[in-house]
Image (cartoon, helix red, strand yellow):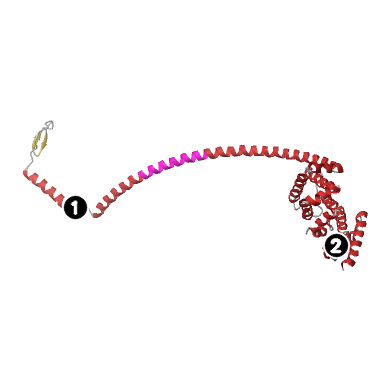
């Protein structure tokens, strides 16, 4: 089928076909094109141009945002991997911590069992030692073997550690405690050593640290706490005071007079009794009286001793009466 253009027929299947256009139509088309070229910039407003520029900028920004988004996705993926690794490590550490806590609990239980066993064994061994030390030949053998100094050093450290570890609110002793029996046996052994002449002489010359520790600990312990231990310590000091040399060393210690003030008001009558015995030993030595005369003449000290003369314990009442008489007799010579 042929098409007509400008009144002429055109074969559409002919590729190289020419189109005939009227000159007037061509001129009209040319005029319209020129007019469009002239008036097109006027038709397109500045807002439209700005909008096109904004569109280009928006497209550019969109491309940048897409790039940043891709980068953020990569970083997020990297952080997620690190988070997963950290969580896995944390879970591993938590499991290891639980395992270690279980092992620690088991070790603590085993350690407590070992400590209980050692306390039991120590209490039994020291009880045997306490019993053996009551024989003079045993103490003599210890001195000959050279083992006594190291024992006394360990005993002093153990007693000090025990006293300093006591709870401030502790008011009563625990006689069934292996630890308590252990320190009682240590103090009892020291008392027995001081009761023997050779042992007493050794303490007077080489046991100064132990004697200082005993006097310090007697002041540190609260009233009514471990009276049996206090009694054994006071007995040891009294045994040492039998020696002139030992008495002189004890009276040179600044803790002696405060010790009397503390223990004469003790809530346990045996502690007061043995404190009075030590005070009596001090009052029997004239050189000591010259050194401590002013302290021993304190009226408050006599009042404390006087109150003990009304005790319901006959032994305590008797020795308190004797000590009070000694203190009153002291007033004359010192003046």
Figure label count: 2
Residue under numbered circle 1 = 41
Q: Quadrant of residue 308?
A: bottom right
Residue furthest left in the image: 23
Q: Residues within 10 Å of mark 1 (few under 14, many from 20)?
A: few
The one of 210 and 313 positioned closer to us in this rendering: 210
User: Range of the magenta residues?
Assistant: 67-87
C-alpha distance separating marks 2 and 1: 130 Å
Q: Quadrant of residue 320?
A: bottom right
Residue at image point 79% right, 41% down:
145
Q: Tell me the crowding category of disc 2: few under 14, some 14 to 19, or many 20 or more residues within 10 angstroms, Cα based.
A: some
Quarter of the N terminus within the rendering: top left
Asked whether the viewer can see residue 202, the reply is yes
Q: Which mark's residue is nearer the viewer, 2 or 1?
A: 2
First reached walking from the N terminus: tag 2 or tag 1: 1
Kindly indicate the quadrant of the structure image that contains residue 6: top left
Q: Is residue 8 left or right of residue 104?
A: left
Q: Look at the magenta stretch and give its main secondary structure.
A: helix
The image position of residue 310, as x and y in percent, is 91, 59
Disc marking residue 289: 2
**Residue 135 within the magenta-colored segment of the rendering:** no
Badge 2 vs badge 1, beta-carbon distance below 8 Å = no
Q: Camera-side residue: 10 or 59? A: 59
Look at the picture and state if 112 lies above or below 315. Answer: above
């Amino acid at each position: 089928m042929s098409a007509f253009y400008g009144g002429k027929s055109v074969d559409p299947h002919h590729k190289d076909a020419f189109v005939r256009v009227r000159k007037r139509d061509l001129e009209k088309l040319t005029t319209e094109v020129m007019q469009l070229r002239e008036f097109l910039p006027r038709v397109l407003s500045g807002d439209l141009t700005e909008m096109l520029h904004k569109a280009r900028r928006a497209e550019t920004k969109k491309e940048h945002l897409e790039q940043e988004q891709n980068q953020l996705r990569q970083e997020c993926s990297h952080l997620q991997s690190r988070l997963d690794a950290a969580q896995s490590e944390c879970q591993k550490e938590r499991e290891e911590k639980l395992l270690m806590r279980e092992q620690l609990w088991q070790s603590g239980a085993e350690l407590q069992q070992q400590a209980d066993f050692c306390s039991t064994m120590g209490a039994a061994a020291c009880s045997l030692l306490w019993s053996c030390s009551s024989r003079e030949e045993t103490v003599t053998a210890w001195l000959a073997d050279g083992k006594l100094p190291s024992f006394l050093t360990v005993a002093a450290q153990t007693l000090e550690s025990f006293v300093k570890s006591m709870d401030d609110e502790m008011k009563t002793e625990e006689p069934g405690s292996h630890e308590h029996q252990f320190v009682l046996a240590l103090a009892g052994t020291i008392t027995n050593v001081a009761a023997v002449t050779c042992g007493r002489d050794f303490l007077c010359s080489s046991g100064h640290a132990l004697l200082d520790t005993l006097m310090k600990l007697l002041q540190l312990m609260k009233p009514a706490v471990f009276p049996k231990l206090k009694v054994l310590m006071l007995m040891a000091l009294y045994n040492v005071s039998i020696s002139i040399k030992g008495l002189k060393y004890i009276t040179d210690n600044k803790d002696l007079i405060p010790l009397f003030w503390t223990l004469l008001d003790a809530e346990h009558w045996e502690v007061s009794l043995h404190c009075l015995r030590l005070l009596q030993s001090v009052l029997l030595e004239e050189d000591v009286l010259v050194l401590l005369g002013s302290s021993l003449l304190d009226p408050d000290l006599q009042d404390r001793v006087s109150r003990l003369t009304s005790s319901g314990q006959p032994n305590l009442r008797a020795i308190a009466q004797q000590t009070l008489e000694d203190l009153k007799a002291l007033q004359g010579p010192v003046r």
